[in-house]
């Protein structure tokens, strides 16, 4: 085959076949096809699009470009959960123990964050002693014995996606539905679960700001998952304001623990129960998503979810005492407060502004090499719909660099929009696709 001919074919709007897609993916991973030719192909894709068949084939080619995980030694139906990313999204830390407490085996691989805050594994590393690297046999055994395990994604999973994403990032070819969907789903399919629940965020703090775009992406990803023989459901959820009140790494773990204790914010609690319920249903432990949600609610109320989280932390070398003593988490040396300058109601709380502010505190990384400050972040005292008076605290800011915290406060100030009339909080769950 010839890469120039493949580029020409896509430039003319003609679909690529399976052999052509697999040939260019294999050659690119092997270093036989240069970046400039793949860049040209990616740009042609952005202009001409991908058919459903092309998107499925691209996903499969990336899925098998490296190692895949075999979870067959784990008893039961394995269900994965993936979020497209947002501000304050710590649901995995609540959803996984709730689902595991209901008998669902949770074998999860998570990545690190690049942006507003760290990813799930970054958050878990704020627990003293917690290990995110495990040998495959230990990982599988822990799921069978404890019911859940969460580890970092290895460098050998979907290497094609890593190379393609790095190239897309510097060639303005990130924002294409087929490329986004194949990137996400190749990793999920390689991770070996039998079914997948996708939390597709929608709003100014998400990659998909418009509802129609979120629906399009969700539909493509569910089609890919189902075509690969994995039952896949997508839940489109609100990200116009941060999820929960904590935005940061250790701050979010503390909030997740509070949620498992039954003391968490309403939105985090409701969404976690909904997502866990969907997983429980797809895993065959409930006859309907509604029954699964009720089972998750019970696991939260009777403390089984918290107990499972404690077992999980201990099994992976973490200090379970943090569950009862939050002072054991990394502590910030700087704490400032943003105060309201007028009476009224919070009419809008822009998730993107809060996300950027949290990154400025040190809670996120702008480059892969940058170190995260696990103690840094923001705690929101007021959210959309809340009344506020002059001098009341809108948010607490944490960090270990006074200048960075001050810069974060200036950024966040613009994210709070106070009006004279009360408004209702936005609807949390917008649509479910794939049921």
Image: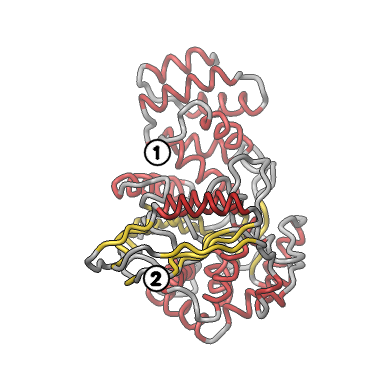
Residue at mark 1: 177
| Residue at 43% in and 50% down | 353
Around disc 1, counting alpha carbons within 10 Å, would you say few (fewer than 14), some (14 to 19), or many (20 or more)? Answer: many
Name the N-terminal-most of marks 1 and 2.
Answer: 1
Where the C terminus falls, by quadrant? bottom left
Mark 1: which secondary structure? Answer: helix
Residue under the image location 43 percent in, 59 percent down = 242
Q: Position of residue 4 (x, y in %)?
A: 50, 12
User: Which is in the foreground here, disc 1 or disc 2?
Assistant: 1
Q: Is residue 314 above or below residue 158?
A: below
* Residue at which label 2 appears: 289
Side of 271 where 132 appears, left or right: right
Mark 2, secondary structure of its residue: helix
Instruction: Report the residue at 42% width, 37% height from top.
Output: 178
Q: Which mark is residue 347?
A: none
Query: Measured from the top left, where is residue 141 in percent x and y?
Result: 73, 66
Q: Looking at the image, which residue sits at the far bottom?
A: 302
């Amino acid at each position: 085959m010839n890469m120039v001919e493949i580029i020409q074919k896509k430039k003319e709007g003609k679909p690529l076949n399976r052999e052509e897609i697999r040939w260019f993916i294999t050659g690119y991973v092997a270093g036989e096809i240069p970046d400039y030719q793949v860049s040209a192909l990616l740009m042609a894709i952005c202009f001409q699009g991908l058919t459903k068949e092309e998107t499925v084939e691209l996903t499969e080619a990336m899925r098998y470009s490296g190692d895949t995980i075999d979870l067959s030694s784990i008893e039961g139906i394995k269900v994965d959960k993936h979020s497209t990313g947002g501000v304050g999204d710590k649901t995995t830390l609540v959803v996984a123990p709730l689902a595991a407490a209901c008998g669902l085996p949770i074998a999860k691989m998570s990545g690190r964050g690049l942006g507003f805050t760290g990813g799930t594994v970054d958050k878990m590393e704020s627990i003293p002693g917690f290990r995110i690297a495990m040998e495959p046999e230990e990982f599988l055994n822990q799921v069978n014995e404890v019911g859940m395990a969460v580890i970092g994604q290895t460098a050998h999973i979907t290497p094609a996606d890593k190379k393609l994403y790095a190239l897309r990032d510097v060639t303005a070819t990130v924002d294409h539905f087929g490329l986004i969907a194949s990137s996400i789903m190749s990793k999920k399919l390689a991770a070996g679960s039998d079914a997948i629940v996708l939390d597709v965020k929608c709003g100014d703090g998400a990659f998909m700001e418009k509802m129609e775009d979120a629906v399009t992406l969700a539909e493509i990803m569910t089609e890919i998952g189902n075509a690969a023989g994995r039952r896949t459901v997508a839940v489109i959820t609100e990200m116009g304001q941060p999820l929960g009140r904590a935005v940061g790494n250790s701050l979010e773990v503390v909030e997740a623990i509070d949620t498992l204790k039954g003391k968490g914010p309403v939105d985090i609690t409701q969404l976690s129960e909904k997502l866990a319920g969907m997983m429980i249903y797809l895993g065959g432990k409930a006859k309907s998503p509604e029954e699964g949600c009720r089972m998750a609610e019970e696991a939260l109320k009777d403390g089984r979810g918290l107990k499972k989280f404690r077992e999980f932390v201990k099994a992976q070398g973490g200090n379970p005492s943090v569950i009862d003593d939050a002072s054991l988490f990394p502590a910030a040396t700087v704490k400032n407060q943003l105060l309201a300058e007028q009476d009224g109601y919070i009419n809008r709380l822009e998730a993107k502004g809060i996300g950027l502010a949290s990154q400025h505190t040190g809670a996120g990384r702008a480059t892969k090499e940058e170190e995260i400050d696990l103690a840094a972040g923001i705690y929101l005292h007021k959210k959309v719909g809340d009344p506020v008076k002059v001098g009341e605290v809108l948010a607490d800011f944490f960090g270990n660099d006074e200048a960075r915290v001050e810069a974060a406060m200036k950024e966040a100030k613009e994210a709070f929009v106070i009006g004279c009339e009360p408004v209702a909080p936005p609807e949390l769950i917008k649509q479910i696709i794939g049921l």
